[in-house]
Every structure is written in structure tokens, then in C-alpha cells.
Amino acid sequence: MKRTIAAPLAAAALLVAALAGCSTGSTTASDTGAEPSATSSVDADAFPVTIEHALGTTTIEQEPTRVVAVGYAEADYPLSLGVVPVGADKIEYAGNENDSSDWFDEALADIDGAEQPTRFSTSDGVPVDEIVKLQPDLVTATQSGMTQEEYDKLSEAGIPVVAYPEAPYNTTWQESLEMVGKALGRSELAADVADETEQVIADTAAEFPQLEGKTFTFAGPNADPSSFYVYTAMDNRPRLLVELGMVNSPIVEERSEPGQFLFNISAERTEQLDADVFLTYATSADNVRELAEDPLFQQIPAVADNRWYATVELTEAIGLSAPSPLSIPVGMERYIPKVAAAVDGDGSTT
């Protein structure tokens, strides 16, 4: 049966509804931050659990009830497992009036009595003092840029912290979900959520078979137009496109290094960015036209052939750049059809 384009969001809604249906009720909290809520149960013999990560080894003795999430999409992970965080990053890029994302808020609204987490900014680093005031019994930071110093300060305050497995901002959504699930004692549920999310990706790939085997480059001009940034194979945007059956362009395969999510090339070498489809960002429709008329962009055959797409809507591609079980369905619905159109030669050029 052919999948409708709304199916990914429907799948996410059904998943959250299922979690709400197995509610264990809210736990009691102090006056610091939001009231903790949980709508799922821990696995048998889940605790104590020890988790190794890039910044250390963390042992969690019992089920956490006051969870703080550090990282742009980090709060989505506990919430996708039925645990409402008491603290989380402000969504300062493409956020809504709650300093949150629409998909987080929609999932939160499906949990009776759940409150928005206390939001804090990490634009100048992890605010250790603000987090300590929330009295968490777990901090997850699997998709963050937390430093060793910040980790040590939180650990010295007696707070268990689970950081990224290898390098900052390089964690796959599968790794984050597995690590957060383990830390929350909900590994079995995390595996189910992973299966649901992977099915959304598989359904999207089936809807757009023209993506299979097509090469792509995800790049764009830096603020200094003398160079272009290029996302590596370790960035989550290319990773998800590969999950859909696409292939990184040769220059990306050659220049990708472990722990690096982007590299720069000289603007004079933009022809090397060619692929079956070229993907980038733009600030407005006028900016899209400016890019299309730029001689450096025109050196990219995919741009000249209208096999390119520049996303303007801020939230459109977040499901790829900050993937989670809540945001991936949004990216699959809003962004991937535009990529498929560009593969077909119906890209951003008007």
C-alpha cells in the first residue's frame, strides 16, 4: 500500500499516545523547575547501570526522576521514552514561543499534567550552576558539546552525567536513543522506539525511490564568501540521507575525518562539490535567487541543471540536523520531498 506523506507524523503521534497509555503517574518534585512526569516503566533489573562515554564512566544507582537534557535535540530523547525532563536547552535556532520545538510540545501535550522543562541557554557553554539548581539526578548530554571541565563540575556536584560516546556533536540518533534508554532504565522501550523511527525512514525511502544510489553534497558559502563549508559523512544530515539510500559525493568521502562534522574548501573549487543533487541553506527566497545567480554556484553542474535545493524555512531540515525520534518524522515529511524533487531536476531555481 502506498504511504501518504502524513504517515511519519502519524507514526510519531501513535508512539507518544502509546506511551501515555501506560502511565505510571507523576513523581513528587521540589519547587525547583517543572514537575517530573513519567509515563513508562523501567526494565526489570535495570539498575544499577554503568555507561562509558567520551568524558568518563558514569554509574546510575537507581531510576532517575529529575532528568536534565543538554543539547539542541537532547530533550526529545527522554520524552520519546515517556520521561519529561525538568530542564533542557533553549531552542534558540528555529524555536517557538516556549523556547522549544513544535514536535516536543506536541508530544508533551499528550502527557496529562506534564509541564515544560526549565529552559537554559548553552550558547556560551553549559550553565553548570543553573543545572545544579534544578537538583537533577541525571544529566544526559549525548548530542552536546559539553567540555571535560563542565562534566567534571557536574560530577563533583554529585550529578551523574552521560555524555557523547566519541566526539561532540557526532552522535547518531540511534546511539543517543540507546544511551538515554540505558540511563533511564528503559532499553527495551528505546529499542521499540528505534524500530518505529527506522520504519518511518524506510517508508520515506519507499515513497521516493529516485533517492536510491544518488550522490549528494550538503554545503554552502561561509560568512566569508571566499570559502564554502561542507558537511562530512559524520554529520547527522548526510547520515540520514545515507539511511534513505543516498551516497555522499566523492569529495565528502575523501575529506571526511573522524570527529569532524564539516570542512572548508576554497570558493574557487566549488565545481568539486558537484553530485546528483546539491543541498544548502538560504535565508529567504531572494537569497535563493542570489545564490542561483552567483557565478561560483553556477560552477556546480547540479545547480546549473536545477538539481539543487536550498531550504529557507527554519524548521524544515531540523529533523536531519538535530535528529531524534520526535524530529525525524518532521524532517521526513517536510524536507525529503524537496530533495526528491531536486533529484528529478525540479529544484530551487525558479
Image: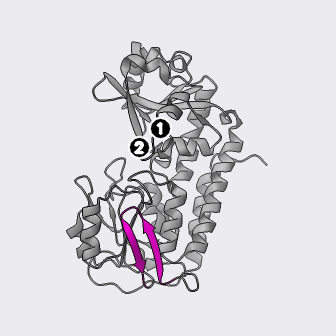
- Amino acid type, residue under disc 1 in the picture: Ser
- Amino acid type, residue under disc 2 in the picture: Gln
- For the magenta stretch, what is the residue range? 47-61
Front residue of 169 and 27: 169
> How many dots with numbers?
2
State the SS at label 1. Answer: loop
Question: x, y percentage for residue 321?
Answer: 45, 46
Question: x, y percentage for residue 339?
Answer: 57, 34
Q: Which residue is mark 1?
A: 256
Q: Which residue is mark 2?
A: 260
Say which residue appears at 60% left-offset and 62% top-offset. 194
Going by the image, does 98 lie left or right of 335?
left
Front residue of 229 and 320: 229
In magenta segment, residue 56: yes
Magenta: main secondary structure:
strand
- Is there a contact, CB below 8 Å, between mark 1 and mark 2? yes
